[in-house]
Image (tube, rainbow, N blue to C red):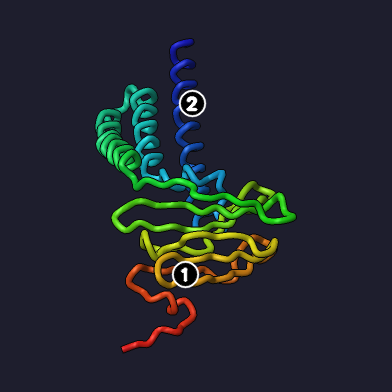
Amino acid sequence: MSFICERRRSVFLLLTLAFLLGTAALAGAATGGQGGLMLLSWPREQAFLLAGVILILLAAAVLRGLVKSPLRTTLATLLLLLGVPLTWIAGTFGLLDHDEWEVKTQAAPGRGDRRLVMVQYNGFDPARCLYVHQDGLLGERRWEVGCFMGEEDGLRDATWTSPDRVRMTLGGWSEESYEVTIFPSGQPERVLLYGSVICPGDLRGECQRS
């Protein structure tokens, strides 16, 4: 009797853990994009890894709980065949993911709940992106303000010109500057995206089209 109770407790624990991981992954996916909660950034970025772990936990629950069922081996094998490769692939790609680090962090003048963060991404096409992080009721949220590709003509610097306005300065021959207003929620009025094959004036619609 005690063995059965112990087995039921272990199955319940495995299912609870799988449920919690699934809830975290779904919450991360639901809060992705602009204004995403930084608290859920890891579950959002590691959704495939979490899915693989959840399948392995379900397989363990099946092996532990369905002792007398003829479907026990088949169901557990199916879950493991899906979960193990998914976990391995997601973990491997996570380790080999593009390198990134914070280049600059600056608090907004007169506001302790708002800061800008400039991030360098080193991949096939290097880029620098600028984000505004703002505290809220559920924690810190992140809003993308601009993303500029290119090592020489990309984003060189960014700074606050006021508590609700950010200036971004490009490098290279252009040295153009762009200012974006930040709304009270932390959301920018616009998001500037710039590729190395696009002339800087495209951000204002000033480039000549052939």
What is the spatial separation of the Cα atoms under label 2 and label 1, in whole angstroms?
Answer: 58 Å
- 112 up-or-down from 72: above or below: below
> Residue 127 or 2: which is nearer the viewer?
127
Q: Which quadrant would residue 166 be assigned to in this image? A: bottom right
Whole-percent x, y for residue 110 in the image: 74, 55
> Residue 206 or 62: which is nearer the viewer?
206
- 81 up-or-down from 184: above or below: above
Of the image marks 2 and 1, the number of the one nearer the N terminus = 2
Q: Are marks 2 and 1 in contact (CB under 8 Å)?
A: no
Q: Residue furthest front?
A: 173
Q: Amino acid at mark 2?
A: Leu
Q: Amino acid at mark 1?
A: Glu
Quadrant where the C terminus sits is bottom left
Q: Residue at x 34, y 31 (%)?
A: 59
From the image, tell me which residue sits under label 1. Answer: 175
Q: Nearer the viewer, mark 2 or mark 1?
A: 1
- 110 up-or-down from 53: above or below: below
Q: Secondary structure at mark 2?
A: helix
From the image, tell me which residue sits under label 2. Answer: 13
Q: Residue at x 34, y 47 (%)?
A: 98
Whole-percent x, y for residue 54 in the image: 40, 36
